[in-house]
Amino acid sequence: MDSEPGEFLTMLTAEEVEALRSAGRLRRWDRGTTIMTEGDTSDWVLVLMEGRVKCSSHTSGGTEVVLAVRGPGALLGELSAIDGSPRSTTVTALEPIAGLVVRDFTGFLESHGRIAVLLMQLISNKLRDSDRKRIEYGAFDTTGRVATRLLELAERYGEKTNSGVRVALPLSQDELAGWTGASREAVSKALRTLRDRGLIETGRRRVVIHDLEGLRKRAR
C-alpha cells in the first residue's frame, strides 16, 4: 500500500501505524459496496489501505452530491465516531478496497495523544478544503470546476506517460457531475470544451491530461 501524501497514515510513525493495525481488523469490500451510510450512528472508523472510495450525500430531492474521492491512507468516519452524531456522508467503494476497521476509536485516541492532535490538524484541513470548494461553486463556471476536479485526481492518482498524465477515472459522468455541482449535460459539454482545446483526452474510465499548465489556467 502506498498512502497518498497528506492522508492520515502518512502522518503517523511506524510504531503508531503498527498500534493502529493491532487495534483494528482488516476487511475487504467489492466495487460498488456501501461501506458507511449517511444517517447511521457508529463508533468505528475505516483506515483505507487499498483502493478508492467516494464520499457522497443526497439532497432532499434525491440528487447525489459527491463530496470527495479518497484513496489509500485516508481516515473515514472519524467525526461520527468521536461525537456520536449520525454519519454525514455515505462511503461507497469505487473499486475493490481493503481497510482497517477500528472500533472504539475514541478509546484508541485517549491512549495515543499525538495521534489525537494530528487528527485535529487533519479535520482542520478538511474544513479548509470544504470552504475552498464552496468558493469554487460560486466563482467558477462548470468547465472551471471540472478542470479543478481533474487536476485533483491527477495530483493524487496521475501516472506520467509519454502523452501526458494518465488518470484512471473511477467516476462515471453522473458522479463527476455530482462532484462538480453541475448537471451531466453540463459536465459532458465541459469535457468536450477541454478536449477541443487539446488539454485532455477522454476514454472509458480514463482521462489523459496533455497540458497540465493549460488545465490549471482554465481551472483558475
Image: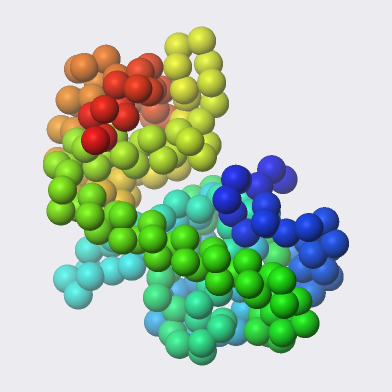
Position of residue 104 in the picture relative to residue 70 (left or right): right
Position of residue 83 in the picture relative to residue 187 (left or right): right
- Quadrant where the N terminus is found in the figure: top right
The foreground one among 114 and 212 is 114
State which quadrant residue 106 falls in.
Answer: bottom right
> What colour scheme has been applied to the protein in the rendered image?
rainbow
The foreground one among 149 and 186 is 149
The foreground one among 160 and 204 is 160
Q: Residue furthest top?
A: 162
Residue 44 visible, this orientation: yes
151 w.r.t. 72: above or below: above
* Residue 152 placement (x, y as % from top left): 41, 40
Q: How many marks?
A: 0
Q: Residue furthest bottom?
A: 84
162 w.r.t. 1: above or below: above
Q: Give the residue displayed 58% in from the left and 57% down from the top.
A: 74
Q: Give the residue displayed 38% in from the left and 57% down from the top.
A: 129
* Residue 79 placement (x, y as % from top left): 50, 77
Residue 32 visible, this orientation: no
* Residue 197 placement (x, y as % from top left): 21, 17
78 w.r.t. 74: above or below: below
The foreground one among 72 and 205 is 72
Q: Give the residue displayed 63% in from the left and 72% down from the top.
A: 117
11 w.r.t. 25: above or below: above
State which quadrant residue 143 falls in.
Answer: top left
Position of residue 182 in the picture relative to residue 207 (left or right): left
State which quadrant residue 13 falls in.
Answer: bottom right
- Quadrant where the C terminus is found in the figure: top left
Q: Give the residue displayed 45% in from the left and 52% down from the top.
A: 69
* Residue 101 placement (x, y as % from top left): 68, 70
